[in-house]
Image (cartoon, rainbow, N blue to C red):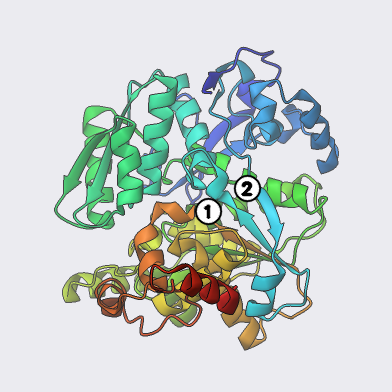
């Protein structure tokens, strides 16, 4: 049930402010405004804290005491349970629908597929969130901030998951109206059905996600609508708690690797920020390495970081490779194209924050084909945790890094599964189908030539003896 909590406002709001990530600018702003970028220089913003004035536990295990307060909606939430590490809002203004009840699953079957020792691969399954994806972690924080500002409308551009999450929060809380922008033919029915069912105003434009993102920012600025895309720094505050839950599940031990799909790069950016803050506070003594996995049909980060040497460089990012590559895509009409629709993005808005995370976490970037994604997805599903195609990019990427020797078989690896299988069931059905025409139509055009791990249905006559024989043969 949606809740706007009415609890003791024990955390001061004046410990938080917004800061430009450009070290040359470093302008600061209060938290009582929402900026999509720094008004002074146009760079992205962070939510930053004066930790000396906050009430931060002396050790991470102190958060275990919050489990005894689960009748309090704040502590029931897997995001707000860690309120002391995102104290930009008093507790009596927190918005929650019970997000973050996710788990970290040891997956030995997937571990064998990747090439890791038994017990060393874990899947962080974010598909258990109320809207079925990781987006709820950030959306509860963004909607909380929007409500603090008295917003009556909130908008986003989306490939599906963001729109579903925003629509859910607006519908469940009745606090504001959701306005979502989607590209033409660039959203799965599983995700679109959520936005429509939850009552969002859906605006479909001729173009892809990058076009929708451009327009929603213009519209939000002109009409004064609160923008909840991951350019919003408050949304990333919620998403960083995914890493806090990973640490909690590992009994506060830091893994060797975090592997995450890369689309708009909000997750990777927020993960890096989480570890930067935890290290600064002395709550961890080391940081994991970060691997970000692009789909080969939407591989801007891979192209810039691995092929063109783009780096954070202490905040002094060389803009030339970015401009050159963006101009190249414009000249040649290159659009993102992958079955992993959730990461089908060519112009990630969090690029610079992601570069910062890669530098801090000694990270790497890889790209994987749709074939590799679907094979990895089938392996994840065989272990009982179905995920949408984009999620499986993390597992496919871990397999490549293991094959390259970048990840050792003894490393402890966490792959983030960002969304539920039913978000995009079409590709799953086609992969496992006996209908070759369906396979070719849905997957063949994307370069998928085989279903190495398909679990195909068997056809038998409607006769008891034949059915029994088939079951005895195959089960």
Element assignment for label 2: helix
Residue 89, position as x, y percentages in the image: 58, 24
Q: Which residue is rendered at x = 44% and y = 82% of the image?
A: 307
Q: Earlier in the sequence, mark 1 or mark 2?
A: 2
Q: Which residue is rendered at x = 66% and y = 82% of the image?
A: 406
User: Residue at label 2?
Assistant: 242
Q: Quadrant of the C terminus?
A: bottom right
Residue 450, position as x, y percentages in the image: 40, 84
Observer-nearest of 231 and 293? 293
User: Residue at label 1?
Assistant: 267
Residue 39 to residue 318: above or below: above
Element assignment for label 1: helix
Label 1 Cα neighbours within 10 Å, binned few <14 / some 14-19 / many ≥20? many
Quarter residue 203 falls in: top left
Q: Which residue is rendered at x = 59% and y = 28% of the image?
A: 88
Quarter residue 187 falls in: bottom left
Residue 293 to residue 284: above or below: below
Q: Is residue 308 visible?
A: no
Residue 72 to residue 367: above or below: above
Residue 366, position as x, y percentages in the image: 51, 76
């Amino acid at each position: 049930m949606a809740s706007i909590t009415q609890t003791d406002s024990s955390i001061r709001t004046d410990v938080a402010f917004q800061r430009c990530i450009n070290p040359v600018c470093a302008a600061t702003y209060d938290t009582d405004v929402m900026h999509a970028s720094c008004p002074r220089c146009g760079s992205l913003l962070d939510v930053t804290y004066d930790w000396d004035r906050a009430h931060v536990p002396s050790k991470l295990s102190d958060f275990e005491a919050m489990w005894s307060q689960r009748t309090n909606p704040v502590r029931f939430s897997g995001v707000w349970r860690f309120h002391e590490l995102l104290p930009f809002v008093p507790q009596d203004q927190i918005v929650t629908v019970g997000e973050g009840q996710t788990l970290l699953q040891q997956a030995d079957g997937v571990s064998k597929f990747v090439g890791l020792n038994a017990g060393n691969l874990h899947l962080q399954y974010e598909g258990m969130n109320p809207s079925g994806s990781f987006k709820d972690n950030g959306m509860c924080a963004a909607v909380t901030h929007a409500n603090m500002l008295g917003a009556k409308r909130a908008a986003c551009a989306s490939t599906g998951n963001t729109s579903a999450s925003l629509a859910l929060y607006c519908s469940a809380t009745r606090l504001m109206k959701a306005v979502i922008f989607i590209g033409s033919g660039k959203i799965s029915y599983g995700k679109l059905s959520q936005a429509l069912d939850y009552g969002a105003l859906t605006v479909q434009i001729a173009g892809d996600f990058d076009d929708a993102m451009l327009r929603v920012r213009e519209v939000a600025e002109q009409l004064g609508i609160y923008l909840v895309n991951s350019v919003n720094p408050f949304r990333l505050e919620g998403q960083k708690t995914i890493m806090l839950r990973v640490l909690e599940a590992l009994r506060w031990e830091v893994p060797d690797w975090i592997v995450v799909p890369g689309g708009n790069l909000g997750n990777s950016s927020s993960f890096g920020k989480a570890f930067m803050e935890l290290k600064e506070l002395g709550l961890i003594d080391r940081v994991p390495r970060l691997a970000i996995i692009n789909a080969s049909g939407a591989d801007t980060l891979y192209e810039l970081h691995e092929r063109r040497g783009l780096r954070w460089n202490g905040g002094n990012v060389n803009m030339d490779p970015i401009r050159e590559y963006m101009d190249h895509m414009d000249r040649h009409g290159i659009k993102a194209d992958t079955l992993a629709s959730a990461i089908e993005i060519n112009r990630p808005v969090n690029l610079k924050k992601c570069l910062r995370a890669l530098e801090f976490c000694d990270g790497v970037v890889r790209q994987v084909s749709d074939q590799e994604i679907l094979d990895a997805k089938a392996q994840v599903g065989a272990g009982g945790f179905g995920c949408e195609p984009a999620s499986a990019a993390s597992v496919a990427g871990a397999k490549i890094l293991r094959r390259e020797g970048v990840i050792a078989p003894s490393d402890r690896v966490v792959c983030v599964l960002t969304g539920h299988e039913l978000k995009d069931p079409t590709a799953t059905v086609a992969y496992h189908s006996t209908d070759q025409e369906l396979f070719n139509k849905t997957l063949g055009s994307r370069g998928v030539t085989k279903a190495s791990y398909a679990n195909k249905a068997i056809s038998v006559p409607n006769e008891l003896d034949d059915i029994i024989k088939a079951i005895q043969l195959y089960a």
